[in-house]
Amino acid sequence: MNSRSDPDCDYVYKVVLSGEMGVGKSNILQRYHKGIFTRISPTIGVEFLTKKIILQNGLVVKAQIWDTSGSERYRSITTGHYRSAVGALLVFDLSDRESFEQLSYWLNCLREHADEQLVVALVANKYDLVQSDPGARQVTEVEIQAFVKENELLYFGESSALSDRNIKEVVESLMENIHRVQV
Ligand code: GDP
Ligand code: MG
């Protein structure tokens, strides 16, 4: 989406959060946008947030990041939600095997409905849980790397919305990659 209508920003890129309910999507967005971690209602949330990012080349772009308000639980996300998305944060919970197993479902939805040039970054969230208790880990780094390779995803290492690990970095690297693909 090339937004010439916004005078102080050259490009607006739509990014969607995707993945099972409970993996931390809304908290990732809140952490990125406001720098905080709080309880968020699973069903009442923002539709999308925008944030300006300065790329490494100095260009200012706007990330328009779309959340889902619990509709992911019933697989009832409308196709319009994904339409014209050029980037996605595909999230799973390192302490929840099922959320990893379901990634293919969400990836298929994305590939089917989003922009043809969609760039997807995988987010392995809740690292804080497995760091404090290695027994809580349900997905290995080897499995993550294999999934990333097989599906041509971006991956920058484990994240935590709670402890603020690797959130800003993921979003901003995703934006760099989107811009490279889109221009
Ligand atoms: P969503 O359904 O994917 O939007 O997930 P939420 O952001 O609502 O988070 C679901 C639950 O996981 C909430 O209880 C959050 O407090 C918790 N949560 C989210 N991110 C993290 C994280 O990085 N670490 C831990 N320990 N809990 C998290
Ligand atoms: Mg949510």
Image: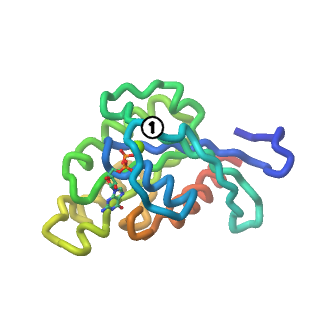
| Ligand 1 occupies quarter | bottom left
Looking at the picture, tell me which residue is in the foreground, 162 or 106: 162
The local secondary structure at tag 1 comes to: loop
Q: In x, y percent, where is residue 179?
A: 66, 53
Residue type (three-letter) at the residue carrying disc 1: Ile
- Picture residue at 56% right of the left edge, 35% below the top: 115
Q: In x, y percent, where is residue 3?
A: 77, 40
Q: Is residue 9 above or below residue 42?
A: below
Position of the N terminus by quadrant: top right
What is the quadrant of residue 144 in the picture?
A: bottom left
Is the distance from the Cβ of mark 1 to the nearest ligand 2 atom less than 8 Å? Answer: no
What is the quadrant of residue 156 in the picture?
A: bottom left
- Residue tagged by mark 1? 44
Looking at the picture, tell me which residue is in the foreground, 157 or 40: 40
Q: In x, y percent, where is residue 123?
A: 39, 57
Q: In this view, does 20 lie above or below 51?
A: above
Mark 1 Cα-neighbour bin, 10 Å: few <14, some 14–19, many ≥20: few
- Picture residue at 52% right of the left edge, 48% below the top: 119
Q: In x, y percent, where is residue 11?
A: 74, 47
In the image, taking residue 157 as reference, residue 147 lies left or right, namely: left
In the image, taking residue 5 as reference, residue 118 lies left or right, namely: left
What is the quadrant of residue 56 in the picture?
A: bottom right
